[in-house]
Amino acid sequence: MTMKFQIEALEELAALDAKLRDLTDRFTQDQKTLNDKKAAARSLEDRLTRGRQSLGEMEKARGDLVGELRQMSIQVERSREKLARCRTEREANAAQREVEELRKLYRDREIELEKLDGLIQQGRGEFDQVTEQHGAVSGDLGSSESDSISRIATSEEELARKQAERELLVQKIKPDLYRRYEMIRKRKGTALAWTRDGTCSACHIRLQPMLFQKLLRADEFGQCPSCNRILYYRPAAQPDGTQPEAEGQSESP
Ligand SMILES: [Zn+2]
């Protein structure tokens, strides 16, 4: 395994890893977007269920209250009749008190009913709002869900294909070099850097002349003293004008 061969394999691997990272990011983002939409629809559905239940309870309470009021108005009427039939002043006073007490109770129930009507109105307004929101969210979900699912499936397939490609590529790289690459990649995101004029392509620090000379000899990889990435010397642009970075992009499927 020559140095040139190892450099080419590592460059290819670095390009592939960059693509894998983009793919994974897109895949994760697509999945998150879809899950977020689904969660939003579900939470609105929950709110609708709760709203329906609470409106039902309030309507029932209202019905009970209206029934109670009807009963009380009959009672008030009876007390009034009783008052009209009174013979003595004492009887009249007692009947009058009863009428007043009943009226007060009646009035209290009426206030309760007004409050309840206000709450029901507010509840219905909120319910309508949530219904509208839910319609918008589930409409959006309905029109985009199948697209999202197929995009996620495509990304998943592409990820699996690239992973397989990667496994083949890794076999071309010396195990200890690959271990080093992986260790740095997991810490830094990327593991490979090169130099042409004595600076590190990743962190741009100026390398010590001794290190640069060693890299120029191209018989082993170096390590950037600042970012710790694997370093090698990369000659200037190739005769056909392509930069070596572009190599990784041109592999056939
Ligand atoms: Zn560096």
Image (cartoon, rainbow, N blue to C red):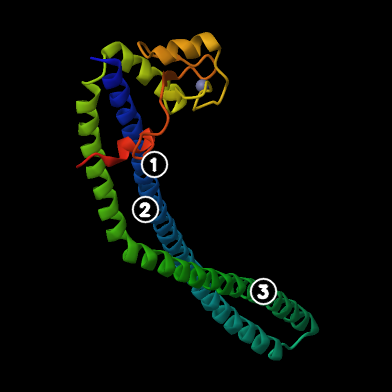
Q: CA distance from mark 1 to mark 2?
A: 14 Å
Residue holding disc 3: 111
Q: Residue at x 30, y 30 (%)?
A: 12
Q: Position of residue 48 (x, y in %)?
A: 44, 64
Q: Is residue 105 above or below residue 17?
A: below
**Disc 2 secondary structure class:** helix
Residue at the right extreme of this rendering: 89
The N terminus appears in which quarter of the rendering? top left
Numbered disc in front, either 1 or 3:
1
Circle nearer the N terminus (3, 2): 2
Amino acid type of the residue tagged 2 in the rendering = Leu
Within 10 Å of disc 1 (Cα), the crowding (few <14, some 14-19, many 20+) is: few
Which one is in front, 185 or 143? 185
1 or 3: tag closer to the N-terminus: 1
Q: Amino acid at mark 1?
A: Asp
Label 3 – label 2 distance at C-alpha: 48 Å
All told, the count of numbered labels is 3
Q: Which residue is mark 2?
A: 34
N-terminal label among 1 and 2: 1
Q: Nearer the viewer, residue 151 or 250?
A: 250
Q: Quadrant of residue 223?
A: top left
Front position among marks 3 and 2: 2
Nearer mark to the viewer, of 1 and 2: 1
Q: Is residue 47 above or below residue 4?
A: below
Which dot marks residue 25? 1
Asked if disc 2 is less than 8 Å from ligand 1, the answer is no
User: Is residue 245 shown above or below 175?
Assistant: below
Left or right of 220 on screen, residue 1: left
Q: Circle 2: is it few (<14), some (14-19), or many (20+) Cα within 10 Å?
A: some
Q: Residue at x 58, y 78 (%)?
A: 69
**Mark 3 and mark 2 residues within 8 Å of each other at the beta carbon:** no
